[in-house]
Amino acid sequence: MVEQLIQNAMKKLRIIYVFSILLAFTLLSCEKDYENLYTVTNYADFQMEGDEVVFNPFGTPYTDPGVKATEAGTELPVTTTVSGDFFGGTSFDPNVADRYIYTYSATNSDGYPGSTTRTVYNIETGDLVNNIAGLYTSTVVRNGAAAPQYTDMEYVVIAKTGDNTYVLSDAIGGYYDIGRVYGPTYRAPGLTITATNIPGNQFTFGTTEVGTFGGVVTMQSMTVDPAAKTIVFTSDWDAGYTFEVTLTQVQL
């Protein structure tokens, strides 16, 4: 009886041993499979020289200090592109007002891309007597309703394009682009302004459309106050909204 019990116990131990060996081989096999599934990559690490936001004196050439990209301590080639955020263009021009975006791109050894950006404002500041160009914060009241998110928004630009002509970066004052954070495709860009008599607040206007939404925007009036450094204009959007915009010039 005792011998039979010992034999049964030995059988169980052998079964457990064989099972343990099989389990170990299975785990080792799975571990090797997982090793094949997962790899470690080091993304490009960017170190920017100079400031991320630059206000360049209008008409003065800008020398970009550049960006260095490394992967685990090894330097990577960097590609730089430039675009005019408000008015287009693919290179910096010291005599063309715009918010220029410098984009620096690098790809690591595993083919994964990365990028970082610098913003360079190159804006003419008019005296609001002979010239209404400038960088402005914007406060917008839409159909009589105001809210903190639409107050002192940064920024709207008026750029001079001729002796008495200007172009506006957003004819609804950044309401959707900045206030609602929908982004630049929701601006109403490119509206033209012809100044017949700035001190007399005599202007004529073109029309434009609201980016992704569509629909025509027509500017109804504009009043310039050189002492307060403000411009107030009203625009009608044919979607059923009126925007009363107060621009306050930033002194650069």
Image: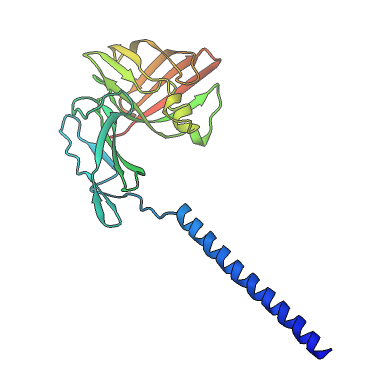
Which is nearer the eye, 47 or 203? 47
Is 241 located above or below residue 49 in the figure? above
Is 11 located above or below residue 196 in the figure? below
Residue 183 visible in the current orientation: yes
Whole-percent x, y for residue 185 in the image: 43, 25
Which is nearer the eye, 159 or 223? 159
Whole-percent x, y for residue 49 in the image: 23, 48
Q: Residue at x 43, y 23 (%)?
A: 187
Which is nearer the eye, 209 or 244? 209
Which is nearer the eye, 250 or 45? 45
Q: Quadrant of the N terminus?
A: bottom right
Q: Residue at x 25, y 17 (%)?
A: 161
Q: Residue at x 42, y 13 (%)?
A: 219
Q: Quadrant of the C terminus?
A: top left
For residue 231, what is the image quadrant? top left
Residue lying farthest to the bottom in this orientation: 2
Scheme of colours in the image: rainbow
Whole-percent x, y for residue 61 in the image: 15, 33
For residue 134, what is the image quadrant? top left
Is 53 located above or below residue 58 in the figure? below
Is 100 located above or below residue 88 in the figure? below
Left or right of 96? Residue 190 is right
